Amino acid sequence: MGLNWDIFCRVIDNFGDIGVAWRLARDLAARGQTVRLWLDDAGALQWMAAGKAMPAGIGVRRWDDSVNEVEVGDVVIETFGCELPAPFVARMAARGTPPLWINLEYLSAEAYVERSHGLSSPQFNGPGRGLSKQFFYPGFTPRTGGLLREPDLLAERDRFDAQAWLAQLGDGKIERRPGERLVSLFAYANPALPELLAALTTEPTLLLICPGAAQAQMNSHMLPNANLRWQALPYLSQPEYDRLLWACDLNFVRGEDSFVRAQWAGRPFVWQIYPQHDGAHGPKLEAFMDLLLADCDALLADQTRSLWRGWNGLRAWDGTLPELDAGRAQALKWREHLTSQPDLTTQLFSLASKSS
Ligand code: TRH
C-alpha cells in the first residue's frame, strides 16, 4: 500500500529532531512510500544525507508558505510537537478522507510512555475541528511504538566488513594499530572527559571523536599517556555513522537517534542523555538503565550504572570501565530483546491501514 506522507520537523537544537525525521523518511521511502519532509532548517542534511542521490520517494521541502499550497497527504506526522501551520490543519480537516494525524514524541523508557502511547486528542475547536491527533511514543517495550529499524538493518550489519570499512574512513587517514581497542565518541561538552581519557589508558586505545563539543574540548595535553591516541572524524552520513558504531568496540552516544543506533550495533555503549534544566534527564536515564540492565550480571550492571551516571554528571565515578566481552554479550542480548518487537515504521503502517 503506497501512501503519501507529510512529515514536519522543526530543528530545535542539535541533530536529533532532523536525524529522526530523516531516518523515518528514508525508511518509509525504502518501503515504497512517498514522503514530503518539511524542514525549517535542512542544513544538517548536507552531511547526514551525503554520498548518494536523494532516495527515490523523498521530497525535502522548506517549511514556508508553500506548505499551504500542496494537497494534504494520507498520513501527517508532526514530530516532537512541532505544531503544524493552522491553514494546513484546516485543509486536513477539509480533506474528503481525513489524514491519519500522528504526533511523534521523544523517546523515553519511563512508565508514562506505555500509558500515553496511542492516546487520541480529538480537536473540538480551531482549524482542525473534527480531526483527532494520535500520540505515538517510541519505546523499548511491546506497549510502545517501538524503534526505527530498517528491515535489512541487522543482515547488513552481519555482512559488514569492519576492516575494509575502516581502511577508507577519513580518506584512509584513520589507522588502527594491531591490538588497539576502538572507541567512538559523540558527545555534548562534558566535564568528565578527562576522567574518561584516564580510564581509557588501561589498554591501547584509538579514540575516534565525532565533530562538535568533544572535539573542541580535546587538546594534546589531555592525553594521559601513549596508550591512548585520538583522531578527529568528519561528519559522516547517517548510514556511515551506523557503520562507525558497528566497527567500534565501545561507543559513546547521545540524545536520541545515535543512542538507538548504538543499540542496533550490538556493541557496548554509553549514553549521554540530553540534559534538561529541570533535571528531568536523571529519572529518564535511570528508567532506561532499569530496562537495559534488568537481567544483567550484577557486577556489569553496577559498573555500567556507575559509568553512565558519572558520564552524565549525576554521581562521582571511580574510573572503572565495564569489561568489554561481558558488555558485548549483554548488548547482543538486549538487541535480541528489542528485535522481538515490531519496529516503529511497521507500527505506523498498521495504524495507517486501520485508519484508511
Ligand atoms: O544531536 P543530538 O544530541 O540530538 C538531540 C536529541 O535528539 C535530544 O533528544 C533532542 O531533544 C535534541 O537533540 C534537540 O543526538 P542524536 O539524537 O543522536 O542525533 C544526532 C544525529 O546525527 C543522528 O541522526 C546521527 C547523526 N549523525 C550522523 O549522521 N553523522 C555523524 O557523523 C554524527 C556524529 C551523527
Image (spheres, rainbow, N blue to C red):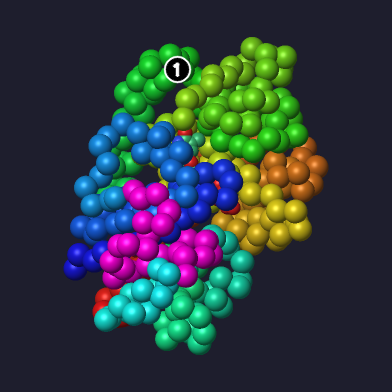
Q: In the rendered image of this protein, does residue 140 appear above or below residue 312? A: below
Q: Position of residue 132 (x, y in %)?
A: 44, 81
Q: Is residue 262 visible?
A: no
Q: In the rendered image of this protein, does residue 216 appear above or below residue 334? A: above
Q: Quadrant of residue 66?
A: bottom left
Instruction: Give 245 or 19, whichever is nearer the viewer.
Output: 19
Q: Position of residue 89 (x, y in %)?
A: 42, 72
Measuring 43% from the left and 43% from the top, which residue is drawn there?
Answer: 42
Residue 318 is left or right of residue 287, and the answer is right
Is 79 magenta? The answer is yes
Give the residue at mark 1.
Answer: 174
Q: Quadrant of the N terminus?
A: bottom left
- Disc 1: CA contacts within 10 A as few (<14), some (14-19) or many (>=20): some
Q: Which residues are magenta?
A: 60-86
Q: In the rendered image of this protein, does residue 152 appear above or below residue 294? A: above
Q: How many marks?
A: 1
